[in-house]
Amino acid sequence: MMRTETREGPAVLVVEDEPLIRMEAIDMMEEAGFRVFDAGSADQAVALMERHKEIGILFTDVDMPGSMNGLGLAAHVRTHWPRVFIVIASGVINIDKAALPEGCSVYPKPYPTNQILAELRRVACASE
Amino acid sequence: MNVLSAPSTVQGGLPGGDVLTSVAILMPPGDATAASLRDPEQENIASIEVTSLDHLADLVDHRIGAVLITEEALWGVGFDRLKQALAAQPLWSDVPFIVLADGTTGDRSEAASERTDDLGNAVLLPRVLRAEELLRSVRSALKARGRQHDARARMEELQNRERQVAESEAQFQAIANSVDQMIWSTTPDGLHDYYNTRWYEFTGVPEGSTDGEAWNGMFHPDDQERAWKIWRHSLSTGEPYEIEYRLRHRSGRYHWVLGRALPMRSADGTILRWYGTCTDIHEIKIAEEQRQLMLAEMNHRVKNTLAMVHSVVSQTLRHASNLDDARAAIQSRIGSMSQAHDRLIHSSWLEARIGDIVETAIAPHRPEVDRFVIEGPDLPIGSKQALALTMALHELATNAAKYGALSSDEGKVRIGWSVDGEGEGEEEVFHFTWVEEGGPEVREPSSRGFGSKMIEKALAGYFQGAADLAYDPGGLRFHMTAPLEGLTT
């Protein structure tokens, strides 16, 4: 679904299978002024990416059920939409950096909200 | 000096301890030969004078050293008794007889020869004999007899040793087969040549079939190479062998086993054998794996719970109009999560019953007069869904107490759930409703806080369904539909 915002710039796609946590991420992004799409799985996320070219930022969880987890989704997006900025949020303490696509930002869960938003604002400004 | 010392026995009596080294003499009284045994140059030879073949038979029974007898004395009464005594001797014993011929040693009658032969170990000497020749014969007979005793002692020692070895072997087998471990041994180059019965009981393979290097085939294919590597390392360095691997049980399943071995060395340090054990550690190993899995699962759940608390707190703070309201809301929200956890702990954690979850969730909001009507079939509900439903009911109940049916004395809340479409080929659909009535008139709020988001969006997300919250003026109505699998998957 899409939320209308007055602000122009890249939209954010939030991918998280835990609805309550997804809600928080959406809240955080909306409050920062981003247009937000959300998905509960990698498959839904890919379908949204295909329909909405305005998505410029992928914000995804790692551990998700379905055909792809967050790392698989990140790799897929890096290949098919190389310009999309990827942020990975992980509950795993020692994530294998080698398994990540190039140019990803990684944040722990629960989210360090201010750090994430600061980075996303920089990305949004750079893309304008 | 009489070389044959004075006879040591009384007539018919039994001799003392030196009978084994004495010569028994049976001669007619006054025989000149006895006198010829006198030789002052010779040492004494112990002698026992006997008077009858019966007496001689007794001495044979007592292992007399040798017998000097005249040929004609063999024809006396009691020869059969003597023959029996000779036949009854143990295997090692063969009493030497020196028979002094009746006349010359040649041209003997058949009967006379036979009688001498009946004695077994007999030499026939001419009656007329020089004293030293007779003495030499007696001495060599006693010497030969002494060798029989030596041989006997040696034989008994060997038999004793053999028995000890057999006893020790039996003892080893008893110990090796009574312990709960598999025991094995190998040659210094690592070829297996012994397994205790526990090994064969465990593996169920025929005895001897895992000798040499065939043991490796009993290991799990994924463990064979690793085991070989470690075993070869021990064989080449002499370092103790230790490994955990999966061994094929006779049931066909693989059990985790702890394998250990140590070398036995000679005095100069050369390895003589390897002795090893296998201990079935399957249950310990499985328990350890389960513990690790449970720890990982607990870690996941705790992190997830913290993330949810984080979400609740940050969203509550974001939408709260003042800090006091936020504090109260955060406390009661975290409290409702805690109740859901308690309920889940009392069931199997993975699953609970929906009726229990609903009852637990509304319990803190139930005034003394019951305002709730709860109806629905007994259904299993997954832990995530149970937690989400508890939190959503908490939001609905809190809202009802503040603004809805529970804020007035007459208001009621109907909570119901049901399953539709149980016909063939139809997807089973789960319905859940919360309907308030009898409260003040309902108005749609101007902004949506955490509570309405939790109810409208998050709850349906956990059930993979859709939710509708209607601000009906007569009372708030909430309805969720979801596939029945959404309750537990």
Image (cartoon, rainbow, N blue to C red):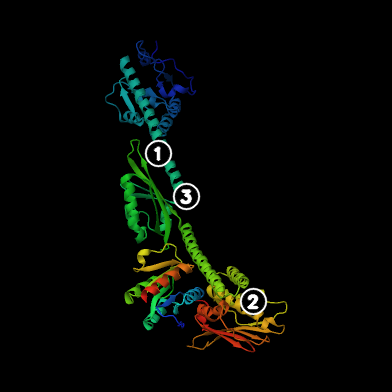
Q: Residue A25: percent from the left, percent from the top? A: 48, 74
Q: Residue B179: which disc?
A: 3
**B428 and B452: which one is in front?**
B452
The image shows residue B375, relative to residue B166, as above or below, that is: below
In the image, what residue type sits under mark 1? Glu
Report the residue marked by disc 2.
B362
**Residue B235, above or below B219:** above
Residue depth check, mark 2 versus mark 1: number of the one nearer the observer: 2
Classify the position of the N terminus of chain B by image quarter.
top left
The quadrant where residue B61 appears: top left
Badge 3, how many Cα within 10 Å: few under 14, some, many 20+? few
| Residue occupying image coordinates x 46% and y 18% | B8
Residue bearing mark 1:
B162
Q: Where is residue B80 shown, x and y percent of the image?
A: 42, 32
Q: Position of residue B226 (x, y in %)?
A: 34, 56
- Report the side of B327 relative to B464 (left or right): right
Query: Pointer 2 indicates a residue of which chain?
Result: B
**Residue B50 sits in quarter:** top left
Query: Are labels 2 and 3 assigned to the same chain?
Result: yes
Q: In this view, does B210 lie to the left or right of B471?
A: left
Q: Tell me the CA gap for discs 2 and 3.
A: 60 Å
Label 1: state its secondary structure: helix
